[in-house]
Image (cartoon, rainbow, N blue to C red):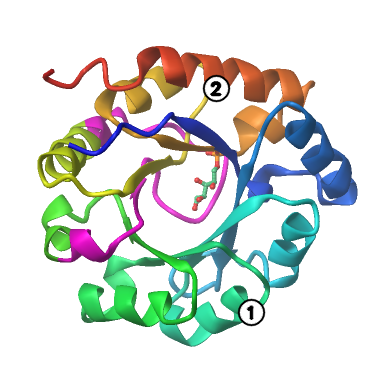
Amino acid sequence: MTAAKTPVVVPSVLAADLSRLGEHLDAVKAAGCGWVSVDVMDGHFVPNLSFGPDFVRVAKARGFFVDAHLMVTNPLEVAPWFAEAGADLVTCHAEAVSDARAALIEIARLGVKPGLALKPKTPVEAVLPALDLAAMVLVMTVEPGFGGQKFMAEMASKISRLRREIDARGLDCWIQSDGGVNAATISTAAAAGADSLVAGSAVFGAPDCAAAFRDLTAKARAAFGSKQPS
Ligand code: DX5
């Protein structure tokens, strides 16, 4: 059994007011945030276009651990751009690669931690054969493409299944819940076993993003793993 990780709230740049991105990042950093997520969308894999590698550079310049969530049809082609920009962890979607193990190995070869993401309809079995190679499994708790959507509580069972599998195999692998995570839903995700909780609207959409970050962190840590068999 690996030592349980302390749950972390990971603000998503997607929800930030880009005209005040530096101010937002400085505020959450001052509140203790160490990890932010950059959602990369190509208009094909998801019906939206978002950020390039420069947004990783902006966050890295402020000392964050940065994960790049590649919602693109060609993740292995663009992964080097985000590694070169300084991303610490690069996540590709299981639905966008033909061989999850080979994809994780290829991403790791870039010198970054490799992650695998699952859309809501993709079963956890899609990642199990590659779980030993993953630094993180991202469980989408909304349909990918846009922030501000409703949390899909039915994804809690997928998170719990992953938590049991990772703990039983003693793997050092984050479980990230991404989408619709807010003050009302974060306890569900953390209780199921998610230890990385992406929150965009709930942090950067809040009047005081530092206070929102602190509140979400406290809720996540209070609830973590409470729905798991001891
Ligand atoms: C969806 C994105 C969002 C974003 C978080 O593709 O991945 O989940 O990171 O958005 P909120 O927290 O606003 O739902």
Q: What amino acid is labelled 1 in the image?
A: Glu
Q: Tag 2's secondary structure?
A: helix
Badge 2 crowding class, 10 Å Cα cut-off, few under 14, some 14 to 19, many 20 or more, is many
**Measured from the top left, where is residue 146 in percent x and y?**
54, 50
Q: Is residue 44 left or right of residue 95?
A: right
If you read the primary sequence from the N terminus, does the residue marked by circle 1 or circle 2 appear first?
1
**Does 133 sit above or below residue 219?**
below
Image quadrant in which you'd find residue 228: top left
* Disc 1: CA contacts within 10 A as few (<14), some (14-19) or many (>=20): some
Q: Label 1 to label 2, Cα distance in Å?
A: 30 Å
Residue in the picture at 75% in, 70% down: 54
**Which residue does the image show at 61% across and 39% down from the upper left?**
200
Q: Residue 217 has which mark?
A: 2
The quadrant in which the C terminus is found is top left
Q: Is residue 140 in the magenta section?
A: yes
Q: Position of residue 222 (x, y in %)?
A: 42, 12
Task: Measuring from the top left, give residue 114's x and y in whole percent.
Answer: 39, 66
Residue under numbered circle 1: 84
Residue 63 seen in the current view: yes
Residue extent of the magenta highlight: 130-156
Q: Element type at marker 1?
A: helix
Q: Residue 48's quadrant in the figure?
A: bottom right
Q: Which quarter of the image is occupied by the N terminus?
A: top left
Does the segment drawn in magenta span residue 138? yes
> Which residue is painted at 60% across and 65% down in the image?
87
Kind of residue indicated by mark 2: Thr
